[in-house]
Amino acid sequence: MSVEGEEGMAGRIPSWESALWSCIGSGNGEHCPFYDCCRDRQRGAWCADDNRERLNRLFDNDSQPDADDCAFITGENGQCGRAFKLVEKLARRQIRKGKVTCPPVPAGLVSLADEGHPVEVRLLPLKVYHGAIWNSKGEWIIQLNANDISGSRRFTLFHEAFHIQAHCKSMPVFRKKGTTRGVFNELLADYFAICILMPEKWVREKWVEVKDVSRMVEIFDVPGSAMWFRLRCLGLI
């Protein structure tokens, strides 16, 4: 399908994006709303919903994991379900719209999260969280932990950017402190950060050149755990 066809008519939300926000808004945030009808899972692809805790542990770690930590990501081409495919489409569209052609993706692309309102990024020495979002008088504020490494801050930045988009276009449920509520939607935000920071085409091209995970982490300026996950999902390691 052409870019025009995928995007739909000007001024209208394409059907795939409507499906994404409907998916987020209709669920409880803890589990994938597509779980019972997911054809990928029924065909034997690995399921992110079945591995939520493993994924949370993986993404909470900035460093490169052991190979065993990613062994659960299996199946044909690492596919992980319909909701994640829709999130990847969203990331691809923003890469095109931002006219970004090579890694690392600039942090300024976060402005596309809500083009009608400014998005300000603040670095603070947070003690517990990697980041947070606020809306103050129509302006979005993303707080990032100044103590985190660059790759981790960038990952958190686009994770929070996904939450902004969900707030604008859906009625999402996010995880609250001390509960598991919202855990699946948090994984969708993680996956958006992965897809926008590490577009599939670029990752495949660069992997052929360098064949080294540490070098890929440097090129894309991302956490080691996120790069491992992306390479594993694409069947490259």
Image (tube, helix red, strand yellow):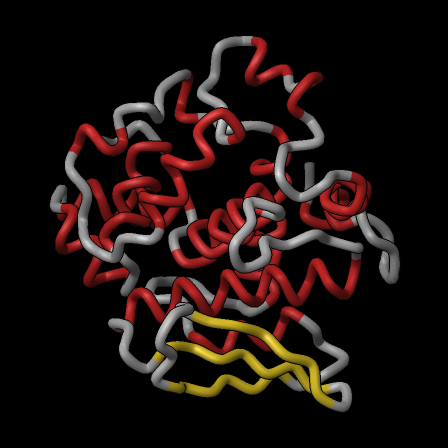
- Taking the image as shown, residue 201 lies to the left or right of residue 4, namely left
Residue 77 drawn at (x, y percent): 40, 23
* Residue in the picture at 77% in, 65% down: 168
Q: Could you tell me how many numbered marks the image carries?
A: 0
- Taking the image as shown, residue 5 lies to the left or right of residue 134, namely right
User: Which residue is situated farthest in the front direction here?
Assistant: 178
The reply to whether residue 122 is in sight is yes
Quadrant in which the N terminus appears: top right
Residue 147 drawn at (x, y percent): 27, 78
Q: Name above or below for residue 21 compared with residue 143.
A: above
Residue 202 drawn at (x, y percent): 35, 50
Residue 113 drawn at (x, y percent): 64, 69
The reply to whether residue 89 is in sight is no
Quadrant in which the C terminus appears: top left
* Residue in the picture at 31% in, 27% down: 235
* Residue in the picture at 56% in, 28% down: 81
Q: Name above or below for residue 227 compared with residue 177.
A: above
Looking at the picture, tell me which residue is in the foreground, 148 or 161: 148
**Image quadrant assignment for residue 125:** bottom left
Looking at the picture, tell me which residue is in the foreground, 141 or 10: 141
Looking at the picture, tell me which residue is in the foreground, 131 or 67: 131
- Taking the image as shown, residue 214 lies to the left or right of residue 113, namely left
User: Which residue is situated farthest in the bottom direction here?
Assistant: 137
- Taking the image as shown, residue 31 lies to the left or right of residue 5, namely left
* Residue in the picture at 36% in, 62% down: 102
